[in-house]
Image (tube, grey):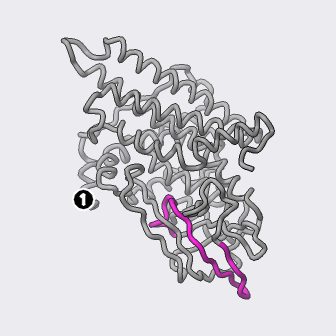
Amino acid sequence: MERSKLEQLWQSNLNRDTFTGCDFYSIDDLLTEEHLQIRDSVRTWVKNRVSPIINDCAQESYFPKELLPEMGNLGVFGPHVPTKYGGSDADYLTYGLMMQEIERGDSGIRSTASVQGSLVMHPIHLYGSEEQKQKFLPKLANGTYLGAFGLTEPDHGSNPNGMQTHFTEDGDFIVLNGSKTWISNAPLADIAIVWAKNPEGKVQGVIVERGMEGFTTPEIQNKWSLRASATGELVFNDVRIPKTNILPGVIGLKGPLSCLNSARYGICWGVIGAAMDCFETAKKYALERLQFGKPIASFQLQQKKLSEALTEITKAQLMAWRLGVLMNEGKATPAQISMAKRNNVEIALNVARECRQILGGNGISGDYSIMRHMANLESVITYEGTHDIHLLILGMEITGINAFE
């Protein structure tokens, strides 16, 4: 998409976003003034910069990379990273609220922020050397660099321990071979955090940089979901990487899995934003659409759909808020995060489907956001652990029996 078209959309009032919030249980009262100020600043940015262009970007399968510097300036990339590395040292409630507001705009744009913060900056901050932190984190934080996270492989999704990507040693270098697929940000990424098996068969994280010979990032085409997000592969053919690019602070799957916990937490907040947008769109439509001489909002079945949608959104908000408190206290468990991710994505997808029906035939039109959210959420319910995998994680927590073995 040409920059001139984006500028026209930004200046037009055709897609004006009038969202004011959705807080039936006064959850704002549980937040600090700083939380609310940051949330509102992100909300305003989404209304002015994402909402006017996002339907067109999705229709044209265009990732609006022009937004990356703005997102960096807004502080949504790695807000929990310390200020000395370019972050804002914010708490987990702040991070969640940011993801909520961005995903109200679009799940693909939130995915970009989640990957950058939770899956790229987080492991560098947690497991990287001081040299790696100084070199990469500030550029990732301000949006100068875009990062990707390489764990999923063509033949190994839910079973990361079966990964085939591996490296051998060659003096001061390693030689990396293999591939990763369904990687957000891959086609444009400046760096990728790649999880591969070392010569002893143990998983380690490696920072692969754009321009390294043998490293390519082909884009995945023909998506029906996350169409405004850049998705691709990471392919490694004898890529020589300095050993100084290995993350020194972790060995084993606990490295990538700890990153996924952070990303899943962000998702449980983000999808609330998508559900809110569907609810507000459907409510506005129901109040304006006349049938049989009166607004369809006056009919019982439409009120039922709206009432149930608001109830489910409120339940998701309360779960996300409580999980955020536990995250801040260092008490949240992986199983609790799995429950929130699974529950809230399911709620958001069901809200989108019911709200789509309120719009009737217009519900599938690109003039409204609901069908885009619904298609996006079909990806969100699968990535960062599928819906069923999270169910089994909870089952293991309940019974003590590992269903994966």
Residue 219 highlighted magenta (yes or no): no
Q: Is residue 168 magenta?
A: yes
Q: Amino acid at mark 1?
A: Ser
Report the predominant secondary structure element of the magenta stretch. Answer: strand
Q: Secondary structure at mark 1?
A: helix
When the figure is inspected, residue 62 is found, relative to residue 328, above or below; the finding is: below
- Is residue 86 in view? no
Mark 1, residue position: 4
Left or right? Give the position of 294 relative to 94. left
Is residue 205 visible to us here?
yes
Above-or-below relation of 207 to 345: below
Q: Residue furthest bottom?
A: 171
Residue 387, by quadrant, is top right
**Percent x, y for residue 177?**
61, 77
Would you say 8 lies left or right of 58 here?
Answer: left
The image shows residue 255 at horizontal and vertical percentages of 72, 59
List x then y, in percent, for residue 186: 49, 64
* Occupied quadrant, residue 341: top right
Q: Residue at x 73, y 59 (%)?
A: 253
Q: Residue at x 52, y 40 (%)?
A: 270
Whether 314 is drawn above or below 379: the answer is above
Q: Residue at x 28, y 60 (%)?
A: 1
User: Looking at the rendering, which quadrant does residue 357 occupy?
Assistant: top left
Give, as a single range, the part of the protein colored magenta: 166-190
